[in-house]
Image (cartoon, helix red, strand yellow):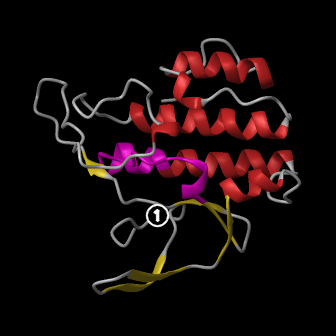
Amino acid sequence: LMKIRHPNFLRILEPVHEDAKQIVYVTEKVDTTLQLALRERESPHLSDDIQLKVSLKDVIEGLRFLNKDLNTVHLNICPENIFICANGKWKIGGCMFTQLLYDDGNKGYNKIDPGLPIKPNFVYASFSHFEDINGQADLFSFTLVLYHIFAVLKQKALILPERMTNQKEAFVYLDQIVGVKKGFVLE
């Protein structure tokens, strides 16, 4: 987070302090996470449709900046890593697994370090540590976050995200809840 300077990423205000037992840093003031707001269901951060759309657009713009401008993937987009700041703005955090993409000229990218404890609920179910990674991994995770948000808001039973193996399948489930336009793909 210290290296990423973008208005849609959580800002670190004081440098990281690390000792044998802990790593501590100070961020801008955070009200809650998307995960906690969804758990409350009646959260003011989720009650206004216009504000929800603006907030989701902020997350998309942050991911676009990360993937396109920095040629980097987040690999950990999930409700607990989307922070809702005191001013109501949603920001991306939890950047402990970000990786720079190295194009080797064959359209293949670097592989994920098998030692990374990536949350399985919001990444490709078939995503192995041996697959090539690219920005599509973050877009798939964001699609699952969208599904999760709308399933909770519409009070629908959640289908386990790890059962969804591709973005198209995730959009089918999302369409059943909110009527997403057929053929829509995030890019």
Instruction: Give x and y (percent) for residue 29.
Output: 63, 79
What residue sits 74% from the left and 44% below the top? Answer: 53
Question: Which residue corresponds to the image point at 44% horizontal and 39% vertical from the top-left?
Answer: 138
Q: Circle 1 is placed at which residue position? A: 6
Where does residue 126 sit, x and y in percent of width and height? 39, 23
Task: Residue at 82%, 56% (x, y): give it.
Answer: 40
Structural crowding at the residue carrying mark 1, measured as other residues with C-alpha within 10 Å and reported as few (<14), some (14–19) or many (≥20): some
Amino acid type assigned to the residue bearing label 1 in the image: His
Q: Is residue 25 left or right of residue 33?
A: left
In the image, is residue 75 part of the stretch drawn in magenta?
yes
* Residue 170 position (above or below residue 138): above
Residue 89's x, y, as percent? 68, 63
Asked whether, in this view, residue 98 is left or right of residue 155, the answer is left
| Residue 68 at x, y percent in the picture | 36, 43
* Residue at far top of view: 182
Q: Identify which residue, 141 or 90, lies in the foreground.
A: 141
Tell me: residue 70, above or below residue 7.
Answer: above
**Element class at badge 1:** loop
Q: How many marks?
A: 1
Q: Which of the 4 image quarters holds residue 130?
A: top left
> Looking at this rendering, what residue extends furthest in the front direction?
21
The quarter of the image holding the N terminus is bottom left
Out of 25 and 5, give the one closest to the viewer. Answer: 25
In the image, which residues are magenta? 63-82
Task: Write the residue at 77% across / 53% down.
Answer: 39
Residue 65 is left or right of residue 28, and the answer is: left
Q: Is residue 17 above or below residue 130?
A: below
Q: Is residue 127 within the magenta segment? A: no
